[in-house]
Structure formats: structure tokens, C-alpha cells
Amino acid sequence: MDKNKVLAKNTIILGVGQFVPKIIAMITLPILTKSFSTEEYGIYDLLISLASLALPLMTLLIQQAVFRFIIEEKDKNTINKYITNSFIFVFILSFICFIIGATAAHFANVDNSLIIATFFLYFTEAIYDLLGQIARGKGENMSFSIAVIMYSVVNMLLLLLLTVFNIVNIITTLTIISISYMIAAVFLWIKLHLKNDFKIKEFSSQTIKKMLIYSVPIIPSSISLWIVNLSDRLIVTYFLGASANGIYAAASKIPNLFGTVFNVFNLAWTELAARSIKEEDINKYYSKLFNNLYSFLIGVLLLLISFSPILFNILIDDKFHEGYFQMPILFIGVLFNCFVSFFGGLYIALKKTKQVGISSLAGGLLNIIINVCLIERYGLYAASISTAVSFLIILIYRALEIKKYIKIDYNYTSIAIGVVFLILSMIIFYNNTIIAIIFNIIIAIIYNLFFNEFLKFIKKSIKQKIGKNNINNEE
């Protein structure tokens, strides 16, 4: 197979499914930041963020095993067995988690309606995520993308409806997110004809055990990445208050757009890596892919940094302005996280899930230590710095450890040039003036024109395509 064509095709399909929701999220962001106080937004963001911890506990990440196993399975009966047992397992474990969580929340005097709304959100997201992984494992990337768009559109329409009736609050917002997940999940269930695949008689504890042997070692990684990503929220809330967490959450929204650019690629990349890991020329291919990806991500990041002051003023209410100065550090953290995920895709393809957990756990613990030690002195900067440093540590570990299995030749000159441009852009960003914005736009354009290897590759491919068409026309 032509790996570049497969990767490009899946990236485009999955890209539409990832970018449309982000555009919609940018539309709804002003509604939320306008309707919520900084404290309310901080609580809301914390509950949404905790889903990253709740999902691994409610599913033991069995959905990751379903994706990895059915992607290479040819026997339909075996595929049905994986699908059936994953659903049964998620339903049973979610019910157990709800009983434990509701009991703990009751003794902590948490409002019952908030408990129910939060659990309903986590449960519907777990089912939606499982169905999404099944869709990807079956090669139904188009259906997966349509479901993501459907969830986002329904969520936006319901939020606008709440705004009309002036009933936007934490519980109603959580409820409409859950309804949106449920509608998208029903779509996937119908589109994938899972009624024919789900057979209760196929229940097998041995099949569940086989999937858990693969998925359970990923849990430390998932939870540790949660620690790196989201323990900041808990620590900021504890030491500085929910209002400070609201500001920090708002500051993260634009840097997370950059993460979305990579996530589009990473969804397609993880699938391709799993399908092609045993091919002979794979070291050379991964090396070229990494170096092109690096220059592409730096180019996108420079553009996003240059336009961030404008986006921040348009999308985020003035009461969150303090978060503006966190963004460059958060951008760096997201960049490191992108490369962490790249190497994570290789580990998943190699089925080396234990190594993923070790590196993530080390980074997660480091994040907590840096946060706790610095937050009272440096405030929100401690949270953003600890995230960037933690992802850097995980990145270094994975880059060194992956050499045991795959040899990647890094273009160190290209890496150094990217670092210089990035540092210059960040220094200029803090001036926050029209002239600074213009300078950063110029810097971004220069880098993308002369140093973005991915764009050079695209330009070369287009020229070759035009040349072939001209020859065919002459004939």
C-alpha cells in the first residue's frame, strides 16, 4: 500500500471531523465565558476535565483493545466477540463506578443533581468513545468523523437554546453535552449495524481477559497524562481558588487548538502505524515522517502564536484577560505533548503498552511536585511551566527508549532552526502590541516558506502532478 496516500486520505477524513467541532467550540466559547463567572467556569472545566480520569476507570480502556484487535482481525465471529464483550464490560464496570462515586459524593455533601449529571456525562462519553474506536477499527473513519460533527452541532444548538431561555448553568450544560454524546452514539450504533454484531451469547470472560491484558497497562499512561494535563486544575483550584482555574482553563483554549491540528494527524497515524509496523522499510519511513511533522508543527505553531492576541480578544471575555500571558508556555506544553503522542503511536503499534505507562507515570509525578513547590510563589505560571516540563521529560524518555525497537534519524539542524524561531516568536508575543503581532506574522511566514519541509513536500508533489497532467494532455 502507498502509506503516504493512506495517511493523507485518513487525515483529511478525520481532519474534517476534528476541525468542524473545534470551530463550533470557538463559537460556543464566548457564550460560556459570558454566561459563567470565572469561578463557575473553573468548576465546569474541572468536571469536564475529570472525564479524562473517569473514563479509564469506567472502561479500563478496553475500547483501545477493541480498536487494536479488530483492526487486524479477519474473522467476523471473532470481531463480534470483541465488540459484544467490550460493551458488556463497560456497562457493568460503569454501574459499579457509579455506586462507589455516588456513595463517596453523598458523604462529601455534593448536590445529588450534580452527581447524576456528571455521571451521565461520563457514561455517555464512555459509550460514545467505545463506538468511535469500533468504527475506526472497522475502517469506518467517515462514520467516525460524522459522529464527532453530529455531537458538536447538537451540543451547539442545545446551548443556543439554553441561552435563549436564559438557563445556562453547570448542570444544564453538562446535561446537553450528555444528550449530544448519546445522539452521536445512536448514530454510530445504527450506521455500523452493531445490532448484528452484538450477540449476548458471545459473552466470554476469556475474551475480556485477553483485551484487558492489552489495555490495563495503558491505564497508568492515561491517568498519568491526566495528571500532567489536568492535575494543574485541581492544584490551582486548591491553592488559588476556582476563579483562578477558570482563568487558566480559558487560557488553555487557544493552545488546545494547536493540539487539535496534531490530533487529526495522530488518529490517522495510530491506525497506519498499527497496520504497517512489520514492513521492511519502516525505519526510513518513520524518520522522514517525524522530520516533516516537526517542521509542519513548528510552522503551524508560529502562525497560531502570531494570531493568538487577536483570537483571545475576540473569543474570550475581558474578565479572563490574566490568562493571556500563560499562552506561550501552554503552547510549548502542547507541542511536547504532540511528540509524546507520536511516539505513543509507535508503542501502540508495537503492543509495548507497559513502556507507555512508565514514562507517563514519571512525568505525571514530576508535574505534581513542580506544581506544589512553585504555585504559591509563581501562581498560574507554576501550572503552565510544570505541564511543559513534564511533557518534555516524557518526550525525552520515549525518544531514547524507542531506539530499542525503531531507529529514527533526526534532522538536528531543522530542529535547532525551529527552536530559534519559536523562542523569538514567544519573546515578541509578550509585547502584546500591533507591531509585535505584525512581526510575529512575518516570522511565521518566513519559517513556513523556507524551512517547513512538509510544505516543500506538498509543493513538490503538486508540481509533479501538474507535470504528469501536462504530459498526458500533450499525448
Image (tube, rainbow, N blue to C red):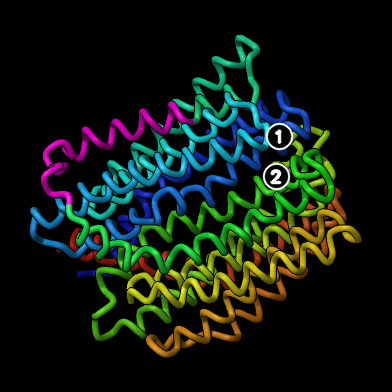
Quadrant in which residue 16 is drawn:
top left
Q: Is residue 15 visible?
A: yes
Between 311 and 390, which is closer to the camera in this rendering? 390
Determine whether, in the image, residue 157 is placed left or right of residue 276.
right
Helix, strand or loop: magenta stretch: helix
Determine whether, in the image, residue 84 is placed left or right of residue 47.
left
The kind of secondary structure element at disc 1 is helix
Residue 24 magenta: no
Which mark is drawn over residue 41? 1
Task: Name the residue tied to disc 2.
Answer: 249
Neighbour tally class for label 2: few under 14, some 14-19, many 20 plus, Cα within 10 Å: many
- Disc 2 + disc 1, Cβ < 8 Å: yes
Residue at left offset 55%, top offset 22%: 159
Residue at left offset 58%, top offset 49%: 257
- From the image, which quarter does the N terminus lie in? bottom left
CA gap, disc 2 and disc 1: 8 Å
Residue 415 pos. (x, y %)? 60, 79
Residue 223 pos. (x, y %)? 54, 60
Residue 267 pos. (x, y %)? 39, 57
Magenta stretch: give its range.
178-203
Which mark is drawn over residue 235? none
- From the image, which quarter does the C terminus lie in? bottom left
What amino acid is found at the position of numbered circle 1 in the picture?
Answer: Tyr
Residue at left offset 75%, top offset 53%: 235
Quadrant in which residue 168 is drawn:
top right
